[in-house]
Image (cartoon, rainbow, N blue to C red):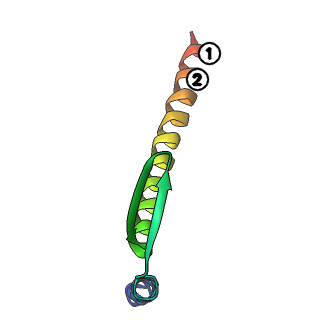
Amino acid sequence: MDKLLLAVKLIITALVLILFVQNIAVVEVRFLTWSLSLPLALLLVAIYLLGMISGKSLMGLIRRLRQGGAESSRR
């Protein structure tokens, strides 16, 4: 099982590296009045991380709302 997990991790790492190598072109990102030029791979990582952070925050909020609702119904 450990060898299978290691193989999966290596495959995912290889795919991510291929994604980086193939997307090194610089792109311009414009948001409202801001403009920024950066490699597409870096933009993809930033968007991924922002999605992870916002998803974790949303799940925490939902969890707290559910626990708060369960506590108020017990009273």
User: Which amino acid type is marked by label 2?
Assistant: Ala
Quarter holding the C terminus?
top right
Image x and y of residue 29, in percent: 47, 61
42, above or below 63, in the image: below
The front one of 29 and 66 is 29
Q: Residue at x 52, y 41 (%)?
A: 58
List x then y, in percent, for residue 66: 57, 29
- One can see residue 51 in this view: no
Q: Nearer the viewer, residue 36 or 2?
A: 36
Q: Residue at x 46, y 46 (%)?
A: 33
Query: Which residue is labeled 1 in the image?
Result: 73
Does the CB distance between marks 2 and 1 fall below 8 Å?
yes
Residue labelled with disc 2: 70
Pick whichever, 26 or 9, lies toward us: 26
Disc number at residue 37? Answer: none
- Give amino acid for label 1: Ser
